[in-house]
Image (tube, grey):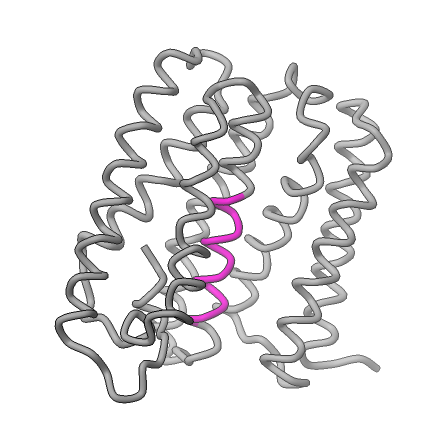
Amino acid sequence: MLSGAIADLLAGLALLTALALSLWRLADTPAAVVGQALLVYAVIAWLVFVGRGRAALGAANRITLLRAVVAAVFAGLIFHAEAVSTHAWWLVGGASVALLLDGMDGWVARHFSASSAFGARFDMEVDAFFIMVLAALVFEFGKAGPWVLLIGLMRYGFVLLGWWLPALRGDLPASMRRKTVCVLQSVVLVAALAPIVGPRLATSLLGAALLLLCYSFVVDSIWLLRHPSPEGEKTHENAAR
Protein backbone atom coordinates (compact mmCIF):
# COMPACT_ATOMS: atom_id res chain seq x y z
CA MET A 1 0.00 0.00 0.00
CA LEU A 2 1.41 3.37 -1.02
CA SER A 3 1.90 5.96 1.65
CA GLY A 4 3.69 9.19 2.33
CA ALA A 5 4.65 11.65 -0.39
CA ILE A 6 4.10 9.14 -3.19
CA ALA A 7 0.45 8.70 -2.24
CA ASP A 8 -0.02 12.47 -2.01
CA LEU A 9 1.59 13.04 -5.40
CA LEU A 10 -0.45 10.27 -7.02
CA ALA A 11 -3.62 11.81 -5.61
CA GLY A 12 -2.56 15.11 -7.16
CA LEU A 13 -1.95 13.31 -10.46
CA ALA A 14 -5.43 11.79 -10.38
CA LEU A 15 -7.01 15.19 -9.71
CA LEU A 16 -4.99 16.87 -12.44
CA THR A 17 -5.92 14.17 -14.96
CA ALA A 18 -9.60 14.59 -14.14
CA LEU A 19 -9.44 18.38 -14.46
CA ALA A 20 -7.43 18.31 -17.69
CA LEU A 21 -9.71 15.72 -19.29
CA SER A 22 -12.80 17.66 -18.23
CA LEU A 23 -11.35 20.80 -19.79
CA TRP A 24 -10.57 18.85 -22.96
CA ARG A 25 -14.08 17.39 -23.26
CA LEU A 26 -16.18 20.32 -22.05
CA ALA A 27 -14.20 23.23 -23.50
CA ASP A 28 -13.16 21.34 -26.64
CA THR A 29 -9.49 22.15 -26.10
CA PRO A 30 -6.75 20.33 -28.06
CA ALA A 31 -5.64 16.99 -26.66
CA ALA A 32 -2.17 18.50 -26.33
CA VAL A 33 -3.46 20.47 -23.34
CA VAL A 34 -3.79 17.25 -21.33
CA GLY A 35 -0.31 16.02 -22.22
CA GLN A 36 1.23 19.42 -21.54
CA ALA A 37 -0.42 19.66 -18.13
CA LEU A 38 0.71 16.13 -17.24
CA LEU A 39 4.29 16.94 -18.25
CA VAL A 40 4.33 20.06 -16.10
CA TYR A 41 2.92 18.16 -13.13
CA ALA A 42 5.51 15.39 -13.59
CA VAL A 43 8.26 17.99 -13.18
CA ILE A 44 6.56 19.46 -10.11
CA ALA A 45 6.07 16.01 -8.56
CA TRP A 46 9.71 15.10 -9.15
CA LEU A 47 10.92 18.33 -7.52
CA VAL A 48 8.61 17.78 -4.55
CA PHE A 49 9.78 14.20 -4.11
CA VAL A 50 13.43 15.25 -4.29
CA GLY A 51 12.87 18.01 -1.76
CA ARG A 52 10.56 16.13 0.60
CA GLY A 53 11.58 12.50 0.23
CA ARG A 54 9.11 9.79 1.16
CA ALA A 55 7.62 11.64 4.14
CA ALA A 56 3.95 12.58 3.84
CA LEU A 57 3.38 16.17 2.83
CA GLY A 58 1.07 17.14 5.67
CA ALA A 59 -2.12 19.21 5.53
CA ALA A 60 -0.53 22.57 4.64
CA ASN A 61 1.65 21.15 1.88
CA ARG A 62 -1.30 19.22 0.46
CA ILE A 63 -3.12 22.51 0.04
CA THR A 64 -0.05 23.90 -1.73
CA LEU A 65 0.01 20.78 -3.91
CA LEU A 66 -3.62 21.46 -4.83
CA ARG A 67 -2.58 24.92 -6.01
CA ALA A 68 0.24 23.31 -7.97
CA VAL A 69 -2.31 21.07 -9.69
CA VAL A 70 -4.34 24.12 -10.74
CA ALA A 71 -1.15 25.83 -11.94
CA ALA A 72 -0.23 22.76 -14.00
CA VAL A 73 -3.67 22.68 -15.64
CA PHE A 74 -3.35 26.37 -16.52
CA ALA A 75 0.17 25.74 -17.83
CA GLY A 76 -1.33 23.14 -20.16
CA LEU A 77 -3.32 25.93 -21.81
CA ILE A 78 -0.24 27.91 -22.81
CA PHE A 79 -0.02 28.03 -26.63
CA HIS A 80 -3.68 26.92 -26.75
CA ALA A 81 -5.39 29.89 -25.08
CA GLU A 82 -7.48 30.70 -28.14
CA ALA A 83 -9.25 27.36 -27.71
CA VAL A 84 -10.65 28.35 -24.32
CA SER A 85 -11.22 32.08 -24.85
CA THR A 86 -14.98 31.53 -24.78
CA HIS A 87 -14.67 29.80 -21.40
CA ALA A 88 -12.51 32.47 -19.77
CA TRP A 89 -14.85 32.79 -16.79
CA TRP A 90 -14.03 29.19 -15.83
CA LEU A 91 -10.37 30.15 -15.78
CA VAL A 92 -11.11 33.18 -13.64
CA GLY A 93 -13.03 30.98 -11.22
CA GLY A 94 -10.31 28.34 -11.02
CA ALA A 95 -7.58 30.94 -10.54
CA SER A 96 -9.63 32.67 -7.84
CA VAL A 97 -9.96 29.39 -5.93
CA ALA A 98 -6.20 28.93 -6.17
CA LEU A 99 -5.66 32.42 -4.76
CA LEU A 100 -7.96 31.68 -1.82
CA LEU A 101 -6.05 28.46 -1.13
CA ASP A 102 -2.84 30.47 -1.13
CA GLY A 103 -3.88 32.04 2.15
CA MET A 104 -5.01 28.75 3.65
CA ASP A 105 -1.80 26.72 3.51
CA GLY A 106 0.16 29.25 5.56
CA TRP A 107 -2.64 29.51 8.12
CA VAL A 108 -2.86 25.72 8.46
CA ALA A 109 0.91 25.44 8.87
CA ARG A 110 0.93 28.05 11.64
CA HIS A 111 -2.24 26.80 13.33
CA PHE A 112 -0.95 23.24 13.59
CA SER A 113 2.69 24.24 14.19
CA ALA A 114 3.67 22.47 10.98
CA SER A 115 5.80 25.19 9.41
CA SER A 116 8.97 23.98 7.70
CA ALA A 117 11.66 25.22 5.34
CA PHE A 118 10.35 22.86 2.66
CA GLY A 119 6.78 24.11 3.07
CA ALA A 120 7.85 27.75 2.80
CA ARG A 121 9.93 27.04 -0.30
CA PHE A 122 7.17 24.94 -1.87
CA ASP A 123 4.63 27.70 -1.30
CA MET A 124 6.99 30.30 -2.76
CA GLU A 125 7.79 28.30 -5.88
CA VAL A 126 4.13 27.55 -6.61
CA ASP A 127 3.28 31.24 -6.22
CA ALA A 128 6.05 32.25 -8.61
CA PHE A 129 5.17 29.59 -11.17
CA PHE A 130 1.45 30.35 -11.13
CA ILE A 131 2.11 34.08 -11.62
CA MET A 132 4.33 33.27 -14.59
CA VAL A 133 1.63 31.05 -16.12
CA LEU A 134 -1.07 33.67 -15.60
CA ALA A 135 1.11 36.32 -17.23
CA ALA A 136 1.60 34.05 -20.26
CA LEU A 137 -2.15 33.46 -20.60
CA VAL A 138 -2.94 37.17 -20.28
CA PHE A 139 -0.53 37.80 -23.15
CA GLU A 140 -2.02 35.01 -25.27
CA PHE A 141 -5.53 36.34 -24.62
CA GLY A 142 -4.41 39.62 -26.18
CA LYS A 143 -5.04 41.60 -23.01
CA ALA A 144 -1.50 43.07 -22.92
CA GLY A 145 1.72 43.09 -24.90
CA PRO A 146 4.72 40.81 -24.34
CA TRP A 147 5.97 43.13 -21.61
CA VAL A 148 3.40 41.54 -19.25
CA LEU A 149 5.63 38.45 -19.18
CA LEU A 150 8.05 40.48 -17.05
CA ILE A 151 5.62 40.11 -14.15
CA GLY A 152 6.16 36.37 -14.19
CA LEU A 153 9.82 36.35 -15.18
CA MET A 154 11.16 39.05 -12.86
CA ARG A 155 11.47 36.78 -9.84
CA TYR A 156 13.44 34.23 -11.87
CA GLY A 157 15.62 37.00 -13.24
CA PHE A 158 16.28 38.11 -9.67
CA VAL A 159 17.39 34.58 -8.80
CA LEU A 160 19.73 34.44 -11.80
CA LEU A 161 21.13 37.86 -10.92
CA GLY A 162 21.95 36.43 -7.50
CA TRP A 163 24.48 34.11 -9.11
CA TRP A 164 26.33 37.18 -10.32
CA LEU A 165 25.78 39.25 -7.16
CA PRO A 166 25.88 36.84 -4.18
CA ALA A 167 24.62 39.58 -1.86
CA LEU A 168 21.19 39.23 -3.50
CA ARG A 169 20.97 35.68 -2.13
CA GLY A 170 20.98 36.97 1.43
CA ASP A 171 18.20 37.06 4.01
CA LEU A 172 15.50 39.72 3.88
CA PRO A 173 13.44 40.87 6.86
CA ALA A 174 9.73 40.14 6.78
CA SER A 175 7.85 42.76 4.81
CA MET A 176 4.14 43.41 4.47
CA ARG A 177 4.95 45.50 1.40
CA ARG A 178 6.51 42.48 -0.30
CA LYS A 179 3.58 40.20 0.50
CA THR A 180 1.04 42.81 -0.60
CA VAL A 181 2.78 43.33 -3.94
CA CYS A 182 2.84 39.56 -4.50
CA VAL A 183 -0.90 39.22 -3.88
CA LEU A 184 -1.59 42.25 -6.06
CA GLN A 185 0.21 40.72 -9.03
CA SER A 186 -1.94 37.59 -8.83
CA VAL A 187 -5.21 39.48 -8.37
CA VAL A 188 -4.55 41.84 -11.28
CA LEU A 189 -3.51 38.98 -13.59
CA VAL A 190 -6.66 37.02 -12.76
CA ALA A 191 -8.81 40.12 -13.27
CA ALA A 192 -7.18 40.68 -16.66
CA LEU A 193 -8.39 37.24 -17.78
CA ALA A 194 -12.02 38.24 -17.17
CA PRO A 195 -13.97 38.86 -20.40
CA ILE A 196 -15.40 42.12 -19.04
CA VAL A 197 -11.90 43.60 -18.68
CA GLY A 198 -10.82 44.98 -22.04
CA PRO A 199 -7.22 45.28 -23.25
CA ARG A 200 -7.02 49.01 -22.44
CA LEU A 201 -8.10 48.58 -18.81
CA ALA A 202 -6.03 45.41 -18.43
CA THR A 203 -2.95 47.20 -19.76
CA SER A 204 -3.41 50.04 -17.29
CA LEU A 205 -3.86 47.73 -14.31
CA LEU A 206 -1.02 45.42 -15.29
CA GLY A 207 1.29 48.33 -16.01
CA ALA A 208 0.70 49.73 -12.53
CA ALA A 209 1.22 46.28 -11.01
CA LEU A 210 4.51 45.85 -12.88
CA LEU A 211 5.75 49.23 -11.69
CA LEU A 212 4.99 48.26 -8.08
CA LEU A 213 6.77 44.95 -8.58
CA CYS A 214 9.85 46.71 -9.98
CA TYR A 215 9.79 49.08 -7.02
CA SER A 216 9.60 46.16 -4.58
CA PHE A 217 12.53 44.38 -6.20
CA VAL A 218 14.62 47.56 -6.26
CA VAL A 219 13.95 48.24 -2.58
CA ASP A 220 14.90 44.68 -1.62
CA SER A 221 17.97 44.70 -3.86
CA ILE A 222 19.26 47.91 -2.32
CA TRP A 223 18.70 46.54 1.18
CA LEU A 224 20.55 43.33 0.38
CA LEU A 225 23.47 45.17 -1.20
CA ARG A 226 23.74 47.38 1.90
CA HIS A 227 23.43 44.43 4.30
CA PRO A 228 25.41 41.59 2.69
CA SER A 229 25.02 38.19 4.31
CA PRO A 230 28.19 36.12 4.83
CA GLU A 231 26.46 33.01 3.56
CA GLY A 232 24.48 34.73 0.80
CA GLU A 233 21.75 32.16 1.19
CA LYS A 234 18.40 32.66 -0.50
CA THR A 235 15.37 32.19 1.71
CA HIS A 236 11.63 32.16 1.33
CA GLU A 237 11.40 35.86 2.16
CA ASN A 238 14.05 36.61 -0.44
CA ALA A 239 11.86 35.54 -3.30
CA ALA A 240 8.23 35.51 -2.08
CA ARG A 241 6.63 38.77 -3.10
Name the quadrant of the N terminus.
Answer: bottom right
Q: Residue at x 31, y 67 (%)?
A: 238
Q: Is residue 128 magenta?
A: yes
Where in the figure is residue 99, as x and y percent of width and height? 43, 45
Q: Is residue 203 above or below residue 34?
A: above
Task: State the residue lying farthest toward the bottom.
Answer: 230
Which is more toward the observer, 82 or 147?
147
Where in the figure is residue 8, as x and y percent of width and height? 68, 70
Q: Residue at x 71, y 41 (%)?
A: 76
What secondary structure is the stretch in magenta mostly built from?
helix
In the image, the segment drawn in magenta is 120-132
Where in the figure is residue 24, as x and y percent of width and height? 81, 31
191 left or right of 27 in image:
left
Q: Quadrant of residue 223?
A: bottom left
Name the quadrant of the C terminus.
Answer: bottom left
Q: How many marks?
A: 0
Which is more toward the observer, 219 or 44?
219
127 left or right of 165 in image:
right
Q: Residue at x 48, y 77 (%)?
A: 118
Q: Quadrant of residue 115?
A: bottom left
Q: Is residue 108 above or below residue 35?
A: below
Q: Is residue 35 above or below residue 198?
A: below
Where in the figure is residue 158, as x and y percent of width and height? 38, 59
Q: Residue at x 64, y 71 (%)?
A: 47
Q: Is residue 25 above or below residue 49?
A: above
Q: Is residue 31 magenta?
A: no
